[in-house]
Image: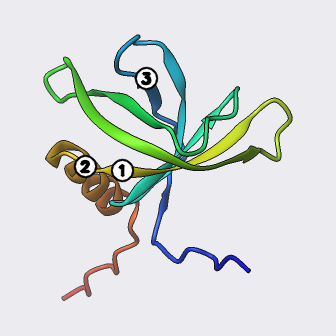
Amino acid sequence: MRSQRRIERHQLPYYLKVFNRITDKPMGYLGNVSLEGLMLISQLPMLVGARFDMRLKIPGHDGQQHFIDFYATCQWSREDVNPGNFDSGFALVAPPPEYVEMVEALRHYFSFRPLAASA
């Protein structure tokens, strides 16, 4: 029996598009992220066991688009609850510092913090 993963993940209410770094073609959207991996929501199932060259295109404060390039290996792929979509889990291979920064920024942005007590 396979055990459930217990890695903290952060759901993304607005999906970021993931691209194939070699062809620059869209692969799908981020469903959630962690420091160890991500879930991709796509129109096609992904090949389990395959390593993919991926790219995120992130809008910067300077108005320019910034790229986060990384490698990830598909661990599983299954049909989504929405017909015509597939969810695939990826383990990152040596995530670059930019990816780690993005995950930390998303964690901070989507975290609930207690309000400061009024004086």
Residue 37 x, y percent position in the rendering: 42, 54
Residue appearing at x 23%, y 53% in the figure: 100
CB under 8 Å between discs 1 and 2: yes
Q: Where is the C terminus found, in terms of image quarters?
A: bottom left
Mark 3 vs mark 2, CA separation in Å = 16 Å
CB under 8 Å between discs 3 and 2: no
Residue appearing at x 25%, y 49% in the figure: 95
Amino acid beneath label 1: Leu
* Label drawn at residue 19: 3
Res. 109 image quadrant: bottom left
CB under 8 Å between discs 3 and 1: no
Q: Secondary structure at mark 3?
A: strand
Whichever of labels 3 and 2 marks the residue nearer the N terminus, that label is 3
Vertical side of 16 occupied by 32: above or below: below
Q: Which residue position holds label 1?
A: 92
The residue nearer to you, when weighing 69 against 33, is: 69
